[in-house]
Amino acid sequence: MILNSIVLLFLGDQSILFYKTNFNMIKEIKKNIKKNPAKTKNLIFVVLGLGILLLGLFILWISTLKMPDFKSFTERKIQSSTKIYDRTGEILLYDVHQDIKRTIIPYEEMGDNIKMATIAIEDSEFFNHKGIRISSIIRGTIWAKLTGKKIQGGSTITQQLIKNTLLTQEVSITRKIKEWILAVRLEKIMTKEEILALYLNEAPYGGSVYGIREASKTFFNKEPNELTLNEAAYLAAIPNGPTYYSPYGKNVDKLENRKNLVLSRMLEVGYINQDQYDENKNTKATFQPQKVSNIAAPHFVFFVKDYLENKYGSDTLTEGGLKVITTLDYDIQKKAEEVVLSKAKENEVNWNGNNAAVVVIDPKTGQILAMVGSRNYFDKDIDGNFNVTTAARQPGSSFKPIVYALAFEKGYTEDTVLFDVKTEFNSSCNPQGEPGNDKCYTPGNYDDSFRGPMTLRNALAQSINVVAVKMLYLVGLPDTIKLAQNLGITTVRNDPDRYGLSLVIGGGETTLLDMTSAYGVFANEGVRNPYQSILSVEDKSGNVLESFKEDSKQVLKPNSTRILSSILSDNTARTPTFGANSILNIPGSEVAVKTGTTNDNKDAWTIGYTPSVAVGVWVGNNDNKPMKKGGAALAGPIWNAVMTEAIRKMPSDNFNRPEGIDVTIPAILRGFWQGGETFTVDKISGGLANENTPAEYREEKSVTDVHTILYWLDKKDPLKKESGLTNDSQFRNWEYGVKKWWELNKNKYQIVTENNIPSFYDNVHTEKDRPVIKIDGITNVVYNKNDLMKLVLDITTKNIIKKVDVFINDSYISSLKYYPFETTVDLGKISGLTNINNLRIVAVDSLGNVSEQSTTFFVAE
C-alpha cells in the first residue's frame, strides 16, 4: 500500500492512468500466455527484473537517509528566520527568531494534562501506530487525488516532529517520503514517551516561543506540570496555527473554539469525563501580558505577520527565511507613537480616555505608512497589545461624508438646502413623535438646537445630525451600504433594517483602518486603492514571492469627491461649530477633515486627508467606558500633530476645484429652498433676463412657496423636474416641521409672489445696445518683427465705455479705458508672432454689454 501511495505521489494526476495501464498490461500478459507461452515467460522475467532493480534502488536510497541531529533545532530556526523591514529595507522592525526561547525538560516534568490534550487533538492513535498511519496516508494521497479534496490532520505526532525539526519546509514528494521513512525509523529507536517529549519540547507556540516549558511560563507563568486541564487545552490548540491562534492576536474567539475542540476530542478518546468537559468548556483562562523585545511598530508587525501566515502558512513564516519589505514609513510611525503616548496620557487625566490609535495611508497607492494600535503595546493595564485599528467601533459622524458623497453622485449640490428642524423620522409616529414608543426616532444635534434651512456645505461642515439623517433617507440605505462597501468598509452588512437611518450618525460599526482607507478614496478623486502593507517578499534564496502592485478602481466620480473635499477643508464653513482657530485647521495647508463622536462619548474620531496622505485617529477606552468629551477635543490634537508630520514628509498638494453647478438642474437642488418655481431678472432694467443679459447682472428668484424638499422632487430621480410630490411616506412629518418653522420665521424674509414677476424683458442688454468696434490703420500692412504697430479704434456706443481689451494671438496686451482709444504696440516685445496673426478687440460698456471684433495682420519673416 505504501508503494502504491509512493507511485501515486510521483505520478500525481497521471496516477489513475498508471493504474489503468498497469491493469491493461496484466490483462494483455494473460492473453499472451495463452497465445505464446514462451515469449510471455521472457516478458515476465524482464518485468520482474526491472521491478527488483527499482526496489533495490529504492532500498539503497532509504539506507542513505541519515537521521539528522535534533540538537541543531535552535540554530536552524535562527538561520531561517523571517525578517520584517520598513519601506527603506534598512530598518529591521522584527526578526521572528531573534530572541528564540526554548528550554528542554524531561518527559516526567511535563504533566499529564498537556500530554493528554496534545495527543487528543494531534494524534489520538499515537500509542498504537508505528510512526505513520496507513489510513491517513491513503486519505491524504489516493483519496485526496480521487475526490479533489484537501485532507487535513493526516500527520502523526512522530511525522510532525520529523517535519518541524529535521527536514526543510519545502513541499515536495521526496520530502514527504523522507518524512514517512524517518518517522518509522524514529519509532524503532525511541520510545513513545521520548518522542512525545521531543515533540512537546520543539512545538511552536507563537513568535519566538518554542517548547511546552516556555509556553507555560510565557502564557501562564507556570511549570508544565502545574497546568490546569483548561490551560493545557489552550496550549494544545496553539501549534496548529501559532500566529492565528495567538492569545495576543485578533482571533481570540477562534482560539476559544479550538480549545473547546481539544476538550471535545479528550472526551471522545476517554481522557476526561463529561463533568470535566462541561466545567471547562465555558471557562476562559487568564493569560500573562505579552512580552516582546527588540520589536519596532509592534501592532503593524503582527498585522503583517498575520497576513504572511494566512498567505504562506505558519511553516514558511517561521522557517522560510523570508525577507519582508513593508510599506511602513518609520519616521511617521515614530512620530505617531510619540504623539499617541503623550496625548493619550493627557486624555486619561483630563477626559477619562486612556487609549488611542492612528492609521496613516498614502491614498495614491493604498500603502500603510503608519499603524499605532494603542498608546503602548506593552501596557497591560489598557490591554495595549490589542490592535484597535482593526477593531470594529462605532464611527459617529465620521460616517457622514460617505452619505454626502453619494448625494453628490446623485445630483445634489453643495447649495442644496435641507431644513434643520425637529423631525420625526418614523412614519408610523405622528409629527410630534407620538405615541412615543421606542420605534419613534427624533434625532437631535450636538448642541440640542435647530438652525432652519441649511446648505449641504454648512450642514456637513458643522456636522448637523438632522440634515444628515434626511440626506441618508433621500439617497437611500441600500445604496449607502453599497457605496460604503465599495469604499472598503468591510464591516457594513447588506442589511438596511439592521441599521436604520441612524447609520449616518454612527449606528453601524467599522474599523479605523477601513475608515482611513475610505477617506483615502475622497483624497484620490474617487479612485480606491485598497490598503496594503507589503512592498516585497523574498524567500531565503532571493526569489521574489510577491511585490507591490496597484489595484485601483474608480468608485466615485471625481467631481463628487472634489465637492466633498472643498467642504471638509472649508474652515469658514465649520467655524460656527468648531471655531475659527480650531485644532482641525493646519495653517498653510489645505486639509480636509471630519470628526465623529458616539453616544456617551465612548468613541472619538478625527479623520482627515490631503491629496497625498490620509490620517485617521481614534480615542477611547478598550472596555467601552464613556469619556467626558469626544470628537475634536480628544482625537483632534493627535490628528493635527500626526498630519503635520505627514505633510512635512509627503508632497504638498491642493485639491482640484469642483465644477460649477449646472443651472439646468431643478432649482430646489441649486439652493432655492423658498420655492421651486423660479424666474431670472436683469438687475439693471428690472425686466426678465434675455439671452444678451450678462451673467453678472442676472439674478434668479423663486416664487415663495415653502415646503420640504420632498414636495419638489422624487428621491428616486432627483434630477427629474417634478413638483407636488406628496405621496412619500416621510412627507407628512418633514412638511410639518418645515411649515412650523416657516410660520415662526417668515417675517424675516422677503415674500415673492407671481405678481412680482416682471411683465417685460431686459431692454438695456440687446443686440443694438452692444458697442460697435472699427479697427483702422493695419489692413494690408506688412510689419517687421521689431516695428511699432499704431492702433486706432473707432467705437460707437449708446453707453459709456468701461474698458477696451487688446489681444494678439489670444495673449492679453493692454486695456484702454479713456477716449480716444488709441495705442502703440511694440511687436518686438511680443513672443509667438507668425506670418499671419490675429488681433482681437473686446469692448465692455458701463451696463455690461460686450462687443468683440477681430482682424489679421502680417509680419515678415
Image: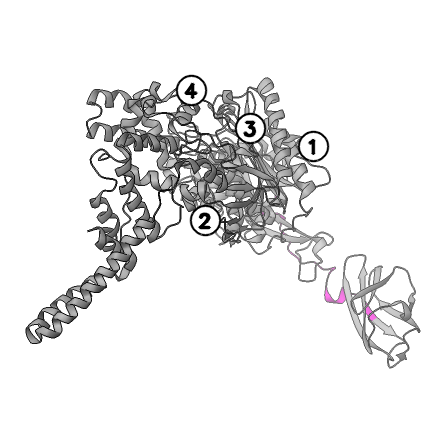
* Residue at numbered disc 3: 356
Q: First in sequence: mark 2 or mark 1?
A: 1
Q: Quadrant of residue 103?
A: top left
Amino acid on which the number 2 mark rests in the picture: Asp
Q: Secondary structure at mark 3?
A: strand
Nearer the camera: disc 1 or disc 3: 3
Query: Start and end of the magenta stretch?
Result: 751-773
Numbered badge on residue 221:
4
Do labels 2 and 3 touch, CB within 8 Å?
Answer: no
Q: Residue shown at 46%/39% (left/top)?
A: 77
* Residue at numbered disc 1: 580
Q: First in sequence: mark 4 or mark 3?
A: 4
Amino acid on which the number 4 mark rests in the picture: Asn
**Could you give the CA–CA distance between mark 2 and mark 3, rounded to whole angstroms?**
44 Å
Q: First in sequence: mark 2 or mark 3?
A: 3
Q: Secondary structure at mark 1?
A: loop
Amino acid on which the number 1 mark rests in the picture: Ala
Q: Residue shown at 68%/55% (left/top)?
A: 687
* Residue at numbered disc 2: 714
Is residue 760 magenta-colored?
yes
The location of residue 1, given as percent across then percent down, is 19, 51
